[in-house]
């Protein structure tokens, strides 16, 4: 079984701000670059070529699109997280998410998403205690910076036993 995830790795000119926050508050900061998840981690025996073909078919017709992220938001419903909200481009990300979770990836659609509440975001913090969570919320509440880029591709990562990200595929929009 291979544990994989499909995501967008946005590149921003001002990414240093995101990285500094992640280094303090995201336990995965040293394992994976800032990302937006399209298909959540799943274990499968799908061959690389079969997955690549599926993704290429699923994203067919999608053109590069702009995204703008801004405003850090605490989330306390499904655990304690700090998200960076997507202000523009969210509908395009939702469409990618929907298209990818078809055919060979349909069985891996998470049960917790069955009600259709996929909210695109970038996770910048994950917490197991209230004190650190409160500190992060306080530290980020006045950051007014926005993060803008054009999304041109999706990536497939393999998540190894140390939670490190190994890029398996990068598939550009055509």
Image: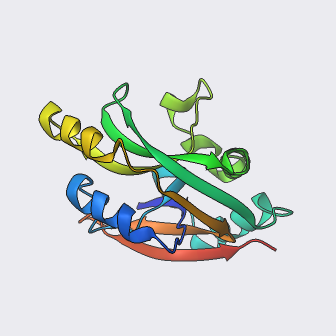
Percent across and percent down for residue 131 are: 13, 35
| Image position of 174 with respect to 130: above or below | below
Out of 132 and 36, give the one closest to the viewer.
132
* Quarter that holds the C terminus: bottom right
Percent across and percent down for residue 98 are: 70, 44
Percent across and percent down for residue 133 are: 22, 37
Could you tell me how many numbered marks the image carries? 0
* Quarter that holds the N terminus: bottom left
Q: What colour-coding does the image apply?
A: rainbow
Out of 41 and 61, give the one closest to the viewer.
61
Out of 38 and 119, give the one closest to the viewer.
119
Out of 76 and 44, give the one closest to the viewer.
76
Percent across and percent down for residue 5 are: 49, 58
For residue 141, side relative to residue 122 (left or right): left
Q: In which quarter of the image is residue 135?
A: top left
Q: Which residue is drawn at 30% across and 67% down?
A: 31
Q: Which residue is drawn at 28% across and 45% down?
A: 126
Q: In which quarter of the image is residue 172?
A: bottom right
Q: Residue at x 58, y 36 (%)?
A: 118
Q: Residue at x 59, y 42 (%)?
A: 107
For residue 17, side relative to residue 99 (left or right): left
Residue at the right extreme of this rendering: 61
């Amino acid at each position: 079984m291979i544990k994989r995830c499909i995501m967008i790795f946005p590149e921003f000119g001002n990414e240093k701000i995101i990285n500094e926050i992640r280094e303090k508050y995201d336990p995965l900061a040293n394992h994976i670059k800032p990302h937006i998840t399209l298909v959540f981690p799943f274990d499968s025996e799908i061959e690389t070529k079969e997955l690549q073909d599926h993704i290429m078919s699923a994203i067919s017709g999608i053109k590069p699109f702009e995204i703008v992220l801004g405003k850090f938001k605490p989330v306390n419903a499904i655990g304690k997280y700090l998200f960076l909200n997507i202000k523009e481009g969210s509908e395009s990300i939702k469409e990618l998410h929907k298209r990818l979770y078809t055919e060979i990836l349909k069985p891996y659609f998470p049960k917790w998403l069955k009600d259709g509440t996929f909210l695109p975001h970038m996770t910048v913090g994950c917490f197991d205690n209230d004190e650190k969570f409160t500190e992060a919320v306080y530290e980020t509440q006045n950051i007014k910076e926005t993060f803008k880029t054009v999304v041109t591709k999706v990536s497939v990562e393999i998540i190894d036993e140390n939670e490190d990200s190994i890029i398996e595929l990068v598939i550009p929009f055509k």
